[in-house]
Amino acid sequence: IFIGRLREPRRVERAWSDDSIVSIRLAEVLHAVMSPPLLAGLLGGSLGLFATTALASWTPTFIHRYHGRSVSQAGLTTSLILFPASVLGVLLGGVLSDRLLARTPTARFLTAALGLWIGVPFGLLAVLAPVWTLYLVGAFLAALFLSSHLAPLLALVQEAVEPRWRATAMALALLITQVAGGATAGMAVGALSDAVGLRMAMLLPLGAALLGGLMLLLGARRHTVPN
């Protein structure tokens, strides 16, 4: 429903037979993605992705160890909590950043940072909750808010380049965030869990989310509106 209502901007027809034109355009994409504001945003997004990936990867094990559920119950609970909460969170972040954009050009950065920071206290509640009900509430709200940073950052990358180069910009952005954040999340929490226990190790992704929010605010401070 939402995608069907989107309208693409008019595109300028260009001749692409000249290799020099392609190289210049690719250089522009690299310059846009590697600009200080967007690079800070991607670093913040990488830390946010680290947080969401780590929590999603280790939630079934956490439920099994600390709340006494069977492996199948832990897996089912994880899917019933994380999937709907994450879907709602992505939609929430996108809607809020679109509405806030009318008031400030840094809306994408601010919405993403706010989502990460609001999600941390709920994540802390889930990690430290002594009873099952509190855990469920904390885990759902943590997943909701922590995932809300995704849509604003994806929009930010799309807005940094002309429409023709969106795919290339997204490829670079996904490469950066996946390598810097998602690829290391599960392993890092697992290694820390071996040393201090899983409950303490689950605090690591929450710390990453806090730092990610800070990086996003730094990106907002460096962000300028194109002429």
Image: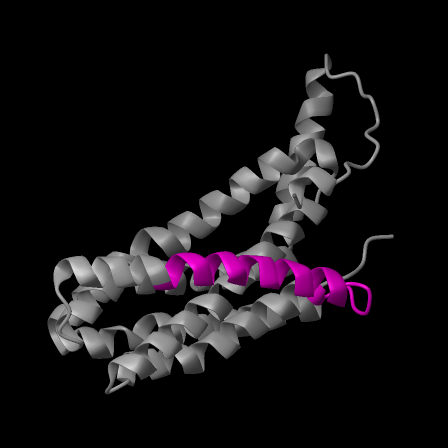
Residue 66 is covered by the magenta coloring:
no
Q: Nearer the viewer, residue 95 or 124?
A: 95
Indicate whether 24 appears above or below 48: above
Q: How many marks?
A: 0
Residue 170 placed where, x, y %?
Answer: 57, 41
Residue 7 placed where, x, y %?
Answer: 77, 38
Colour setup of the view: one colour
Indicate whether 3 appears above or below 44: above
Of all residues shown, which one is farthest toward the top?
17
Q: Residue at x 74, y 67 (%)?
A: 100
Task: Answer yes or no: is residue 222 visible.
Answer: yes
Of all residues shown, which one is farthest toward the bottom?
130
Quadrant that contains the N terminus:
top right
Residue 34 placed where, x, y %?
Answer: 60, 50
Which secondary structure class fits the magenta region best? helix
Q: Which residue is drawn at 71% across and 42% down?
A: 161
Tell me where the magenta segment starts and ends, as one range: 81-107
Residue 92 is covered by the magenta coloring:
yes
Q: Residue at x 21, y 63 (%)?
A: 74
Q: Nearer the viewer, residue 126 or 225?
A: 126
Q: Residue at x 38, y 65 (%)?
A: 51
* Image quarter of residue 124: bottom left
Instruction: Please state if 13 lies on the left or on the right of 158 as rendered.
Output: right
Task: Answer yes or no: is residue 36 visible.
Answer: no
* Image quarter of residue 207: bottom left
Indicate whether 221 appears above or below 39: below
Residue 102 placed where, x, y %?
Answer: 82, 64
Q: Which of 180 and 5 is in front in this view?
A: 5
